[in-house]
Amino acid sequence: MIDEIFKIFSEINNLKASNPEEFEALRIKYLSKKGIINSLMSEFRTVPPEQKKEVGQQLNKLKSTLQDRLNELKENIAETDVQSKEIDLSRTSYPIPLGTRHPLSLIKEEINSIFKRLGFSIAEGPEIEDDWHVFSSLNFAEDHPARDMQDTFFIQRNPEVVLRTHTSSVQTRVMEKTQPPIRIICPGRVYRNEAISARAHCFFHQIEGLYIDKNISFADLKQALLFFTKELFGKDTQIRLRPSYFPFTEPSAEMDISCHICGGKGCNICKYTGWVEILGCGMVDPAVLDNCGIDSNIYSGYAFGMGIERIAMLKYQINDIRLFFENDVNFLNQFQSAF
Ligand code: DAH
């Protein structure tokens, strides 16, 4: 019987089980009721008394060694099971659905990058503003209609605290803190108390531009805007400036671009005029510079402001501003972009 025991000892290290079925077969073979260990136990009764001590000791040792080995095999199986669940190399690949960037973000980034190439940096300001930064510092008279309840959202009926109606407020904030040269663009969200329609929303986005230094002239403004237009809408696009009025610029102008849809021939986008308006601009009124602590006898500058939605609508031919804010994936999915 001792030979039998040593024979089994020599097998133990070679026992293998790569799955639960093989493990179970080993357990039954060695450790079940009718297994080898139990039958050796019953055979033990027939061992002559003088050998009982040694055989008994070896038999117990065999049993515990076997148990250890089987436990080890069981753990190995569990481990490979977890690993194979984590990385299933046989699994077929599937396309990972990628989100897309919002069209307003795309246009904003594109405009930012054009002006960055001209040396502008980005400045931001708060959306909840005070009357000074949105209106007074920018030369809006006390009774200017833009301050009216019809246009402006007030916070808790306080006439001093408003949701900014334009990003021109960031001009003031930067000028108050910085002496020229100043060359910034200010992208951000603005709010107006308007009825929502295909053409108007109660919030939208603007990009403001400001350049203050010595000897800045209207020619500099025109050149920067021409460069910007050609970069954004194509090199054949033309611009025209029409006289206009804004309280914070003098002289003021509105800029049209030649209609990029019909090339200037006339279509329903440009209402058959061949031109579409895209922004307001002008030379910063000296009173605004003085309001912000910049000496208007030394410095001059230009400013411009445009609506991001309007530019996106023209560029992508979108006819309803509400589409930007509805989060309809069928709409958003059309703006696949490289990151
Ligand atoms: N703030 C004007 C608006 O909201 C846009 C604008 C016009 C900004 C002329 C300017 C500017 O900086 O010079 O309609």
Image (spheres, helix red, strand yellow):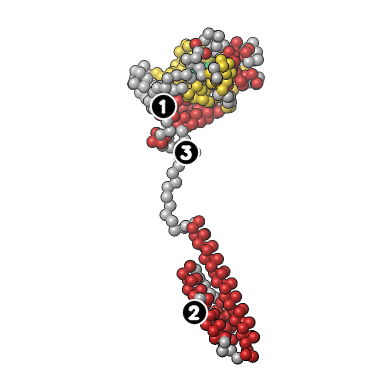
Mark 1, ligand 1, within 8 Å: the answer is no
Residue 160, picture quadrant: top right
Packing grade of label 1 (10 A; few <14, some 14-19, many >=20) is: some
Assign a secondary structure to mark 1: helix
- Name the kind of residue labelled 3 in the image: Ala
Any part of residue 262 in sight: yes
Mark 3, ligand 1, within 8 Å: the answer is no
Q: Along the line of sight, which residue is nearer the eye, 156 or 255?
A: 156
Image location of residue 311, percent across then percent down? 44, 25
Cα distance, mark 1 to mark 3? 25 Å
The residue to which callout 2 is attached is: 34
Q: Along the line of sight, which residue is nearer the eye, 1 or 324?
A: 1
- Residue at 65 percent of width and 13 percent of height: 295
Any part of residue 227 in sight: no
Residue 51, picture quadrant: bottom right
Mark nearer the N terminus (2 vs 1)? 2
The residue to which callout 1 is attached is: 322
- Name the kind of residue labelled 2 in the image: Lys
The answer to whether the residue labelled 2 contacts the one labelled 1, judged by CB atoms less than 8 Å apart, is: no
Q: Using the image, tell me which numbered label, if any, was put on residue 338.
A: 3
- Name the kind of residue labelled 1 in the image: Arg
- Residue at 54 percent of width and 86 percent of height: 43
Mark nearer the N terminus (2 vs 3)? 2
- Residue at 44 percent of width and 23 percent of height: 201
The nearer-to-camera label among 1 and 3 is: 1
Query: With 266 as the anchor, is 119 left or right in this view?
Result: right
Residue 196, picture quadrant: top left
Cα distance, mark 2 to mark 1? 78 Å
Q: Quadrant of the N terminus?
A: bottom right
Image location of residue 263, percent across then percent down? 37, 23
Residue 146 versus residue 74 in the image, above or below:
above
